[in-house]
Image: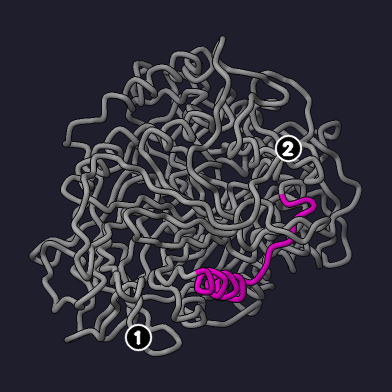
C-alpha cells in the first residue's frame, strides 16, 4: 500500500555508514528483455498428454519481508462464519506459508507459484536490517517461480533492486555472514512497465514463460503507474513508469506472436472489496459487483489474450470475476498481505489451442470463495483463497532460516526503547485519526520544536508510513509492555530523515484539503497531526470542501493564510509524496534526525516500567460522516 519509502535503510539505522545509491546508469546487468523458460520439477511426475491438463497457479502478494508471524491486528484474517458473524483468525509467517504451499502442490504435476509484488520493502527488522536478503533467501526456498515488482521494490532504488535479482553483497555493508555471498533471487522479477530513461528499455525482464511437457504459460509483470507518487525521488531516479493496460497489452501481443496463448498478468495494483472477510463473495449479485478501486478499470481494459490477473498493493483479499473487453469472465485475485493467505487457481490448459479454457459462467456465483458458501462454479478457471493457518506444522527449513538471521539481528532488535500499557493501534486502526499516528506526530514535533532543531510548531505524518501497531504482548522474552527496537522499527521501517520547512498558512490549509481532494478524493489519505492542531472533516461533502476551513485551529488560534509556520514532516512528504503538492512547496529546509530516532527518543522520555505510556486520545480531527 501507499507508504513512506526511504533511500538507504540500514546504513542510517545501525551501522552509521553514509552511502548514497548509485544512479540507474550503474544498474548492474539487468536481464535481457524476452522470454525465458521457467519450471521447477518440484515433486511432480510425468503426465500423460490428454487434450486438457489442469495447471495449478498458487499466488500471494505484499509479503513485505514478514518472515515471522505478524503481531497484533496485522496478523489476523477475517472469516465469515456460517451464522454470518465474523471471526478473526491468526495467520501468516513464512514457516506456515511454506508449509501451506508445499501441501497445496501435492498431487499437482503442473504447479506454478507466482507473486503480485512488494515481496520486500517496509519490512520488519529481521529482514529490513539486512536489506531484505533473508526474504529473498526464503522465497528461493519456497520455490517462487516469478513475481512482478511492486512500488516497495524501488524503496532503495533500481541498483539495489538489480542486486536483489542478480546477487552480490551490499555495496556499503558488505556480506552479512562470513564466507557467504548473497546469491540473489532464483526467480525472475518482472518490470514490464518500468523503463530506463537512458535506454527506453525495461530495467528487468518484462515477461517470462513457464514451460513443462509442452505446456507454456506466459507471465507479464507490472507495478502501478503511480509508483513515483508513493516512492521517494531517489528511489525512482532515472526511471519511467508506464500505463499498466497499454504495457500488458503490448507484451500479451508479443507473447501471442511467439505462440504463447496462455497468459497471466501480475499487476501490483488492486481493488477494494465491499467486505474485509477473505471469504466474501465479490461476484454478488453479478460478476465483479462487490469490488471497486483501480483494478476494476485496469481489468476491463486488458486484452482478452490475458487469462487471469494476480493483483496486490491494496492488501485486500478477493477472488472476483471481472469481464474482459470481449465480455468473457476473467479471474482477478488478491491474497491480502504478509503471507496470511494464498490463492489456489486451477487453469485448464487446452493442448490443441495452447490456451486456457475460459467459458461462460453459470448462475450468479463465479468462485468457490468460502467453505461456508457454495456457488455454481464456472467451468474454468476456478480459484479460492486459503488461510495460512498457524496451527499446521511449520516448515523446518524456514524455522532454521529465521533463527539464523535472528541471531545476527538480536543485539540490535532486542534493545528496549520504552514501555506501553496497552496496544497502540496504527496499521490496525481503520479510523482517520489513529492513536499511533498521534504518538508519532507528537514525537516528531517534540524532537524538532527546539529552535536549534528546526523550530517546528506542528508535525504531519503520512498514514501509509505507519506499518504496524505497537503491541502490548511480548514478541520475545522482553516481557509484556516493553517496546523493543525491533518493534519500533517494524512500525517505522523506512528510517526517513525528518525535515522542518516554512509553509504559509494558505499552503498548510491546502495540504489538509489535499488529503480528501485531487488524487486522494476517491481514497482519502488523512495526515496524522501533532497535538495543538484541530479541525473538522465533513465527509458528507466532496473534494476540498470536506475540510471545514474555519474550524482549523493551531493551539487555539485560527490559521493566518499570510503567516509563515515551521512544519515538521518526513522527507517523503516534504517531496510532495502521496499527492501532497502543497507540502512540497516548503522553503528554508532543515534536515533533522530520522523519524525512527525521534520515535524511540520520545518513548524513552515519556515512559518507564513503572509508568508506561497509555494510548493517546484521538480528539484532534472531528469527523462528520
Q: Which residue extends farthest top? A: 178
| Residue 177 spot, x, y in % from top left | 54, 14
Instruction: Name which quarter of the figure residue 332 lies in.
Output: bottom left
Viewer-closest of 501 and 92: 92
**The residue stretch that appears in magenta:** 236-258
Q: Of tags 2 and 1, which is closer to the observer?
A: 1
Res 328 label? 1
Compared to residue 602, the image places residue 621 above or below, namely below
Q: CA separation, marks 2 and 1?
A: 49 Å
> The C terminus appears in which quarter of the rendering?
bottom left
Residue 561: tell me if it is visible: yes
| Residue where numbered disc 2 is placed | 497
* Mark 1 secondary-structure assignment: loop
Q: Which residue extends farthest left? A: 83
Residue 241 falls inside the magenta stretch: yes
Crowding at dot 1, Cα within 10 Å, few <14 / some 14-19 / many 20+, comes out as some
What main secondary structure does the magenta stretch of the protein show? helix
Compared to residue 42, the image places residue 223 above or below, namely below
Compared to residue 521, the image places residue 569 above or below, namely above
Q: Is residue 156 left or right of residue 284?
A: right
The first of marks 2 and 1 along the sequence is 1
Q: Which residue extends farthest right? A: 588
Compared to residue 532, the image places residue 174 above or below, namely above
Q: Residue at x 45, y 68 (%)?
A: 260
Amino acid at each position: 500500500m501507499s507508504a513512506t519509502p526511504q533511500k538507504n535503510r540500514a546504513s542510517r539505522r545501525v551501522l552509521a555508514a553514509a552511502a548514497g545509491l548509485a544512479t540507474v546508469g550503474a544498474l548492474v546487468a539487468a536481464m535481457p528483455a524476452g522470454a525465458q523458460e521457467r519450471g521447477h520439477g518440484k515433486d511432480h511426475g510425468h503426465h500423460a498428454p490428454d487434450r486438457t491438463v489442469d495447471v495449478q497457479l498458487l499466488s500471494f502478494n505484499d509479503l513485505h519481508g514478514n518472515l515471522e508471524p505478524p503481531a497484533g491486528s496485522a496478523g489476523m484474517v477475517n472469516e465469515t462464519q456460517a451464522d454470518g458473524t465474523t471471526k478473526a483468525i491468526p495467520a501468516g509467517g513464512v514457516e506456515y506459508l511454506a508449509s501451506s504451499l508445499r501441501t497445496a502442490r501435492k498431487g499437482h504435476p503442473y504447479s506454478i507459484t507466482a507473486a503480485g509484488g512488494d515481496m520486500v520493502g517496509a519490512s520488519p527488522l529481521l529482514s529490513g536490517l539486512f536489506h531484505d536478503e533473508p526474504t529473498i533467501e526464503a522465497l528461493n526456498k519456497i520455490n517462487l517461480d516469478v513475481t512482478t515488482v511492486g512500488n516497495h521494490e524501488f524503496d532503495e532504488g533500481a541498483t539495489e533492486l538489480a542486486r536483489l535479482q542478480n546477487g552480490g553483497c551490499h555495496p556499503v555493508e558488505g556480506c552479512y555472514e562470513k564466507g557467504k555471498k548473497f546469491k540473489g533471487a532464483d526467480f525472475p522479477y518482472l518490470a514490464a512497465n518500468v523503463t530506463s530513461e537512458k535506454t527506453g528499455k525495461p530495467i528487468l525482464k518484462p515477461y517470462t514463460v513457464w514451460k513443462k511437457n509442452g505446456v507454456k504459460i506466459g507471465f507479464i509483470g507490472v507495478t502501478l503507474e503511480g509508483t513515483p507518487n508513493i516512492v521517494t525521488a531517489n528511489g525512482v531516479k532515472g526511471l519511467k513508469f508506464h500505463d499498466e493496460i497499454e504495457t500488458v497489452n503490448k507484451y500479451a501481443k508479443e507473447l501471442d506472436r511467439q505462440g504463447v496463448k496462455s497468459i497471466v498478468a501480475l499487476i501490483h495494483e488492486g481493488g477494494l472489496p465491499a467486505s474485509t472477510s477473505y471469504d466474501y463473495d465479490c461476484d454478488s449479485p453479478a460478476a465483479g459487483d462487490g469490488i471497486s478501486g483501480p483494478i476494476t478499470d485496469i481489468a476491463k481494459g486488458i486484452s482478452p489474450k490475458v487469462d487471469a490477473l494476480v493483483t496486490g498493493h491494496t492488501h485486500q483479499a478477493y477472488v472476483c470475476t471481472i469481464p474482459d473487453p470481449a465480455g468473457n469472465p476473467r479471474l482477478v485475485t488478491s491474497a491480502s498481505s504478509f503471507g496470511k493467505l494464498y490463492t489456489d487457481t486451477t487453469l485448464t490448459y487446452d493442448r490443441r489451442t495452447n490456451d486456457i479454457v475460459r467459458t461462460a459462467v453459470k448462475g450468479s456465483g463465479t468462485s468457490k470463495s468460502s467453505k461456508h458458501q457454495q456457488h455454481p462454479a464456472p467451468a474454468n478457471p476456478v480459484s479460492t483463497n486459503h488461510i495460512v493457518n498457524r496451527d499446521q506444522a511449520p516448515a523446518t527449513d524456514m524455522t532454521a532460516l529465521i533463527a539464523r538471521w535472528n541471531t545476527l539481528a538480536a543485539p540490535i532488535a532486542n534493545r528496549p526503547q520504552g514501555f506501553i500499557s496497552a496496544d497502540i493501534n496504527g496499521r490496525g486502526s481503520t479510523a482517520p485519526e489513529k492513536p499511533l499516528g498521534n504518538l508519532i506526530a507528537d514525537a516528531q514535533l517534540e524532537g524538532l520544536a527546539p529552535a536549534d532543531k528546526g523550530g517546528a510548531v506542528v508535525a504531519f505524518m503520512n498514514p501509509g508510513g505507519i506499518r504496524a501497531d505497537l503491541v502490548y504482548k511480548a514478541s520475545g522474552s522482553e516481557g509484556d509492555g516493553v517496546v523493543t527496537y525491533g518493534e519500533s522499527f517494524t512500525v517505522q521501517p523506512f528510517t526517513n530523515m525528518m525535515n522542518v520547512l516554512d509553509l504559509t498558512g494558505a499552503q498548510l490549509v491546502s495540504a489538509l484539503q489535499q488529503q480528501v481532494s485531487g488524487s486522494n478524493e476517491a481514497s482519502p489519505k488523512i495526515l496524522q497531526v501533532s497535538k495543538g492542531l484541530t479541525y473538522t472533516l465533513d465527509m458528507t461533502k466532496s473534494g476540498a470542501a470536506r475540510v471545514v476551513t474555519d474550524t482549523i485551529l493551531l493551539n487555539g488560534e485560527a490559521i493566518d493564510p499570510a503567516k509563515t509556520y515551521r512544519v515538521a514532516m518526513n522527507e517523503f512528504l516534504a517531496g510532495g509524496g502521496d499527492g501532497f503538492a502543497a507540502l512540497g512547496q516548503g522553503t528554508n529546509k532543515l534536515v533533522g534526525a530520522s523519524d525512527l530516532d525521534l520515535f524511540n527518543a520520545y518513548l524513552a522520555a515519556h515512559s518507564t516500567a513503572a509508568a508506561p505510556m497509555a494510548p493517546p486520545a484521538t480528539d484532534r480531527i472531528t469527523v462528520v460522516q
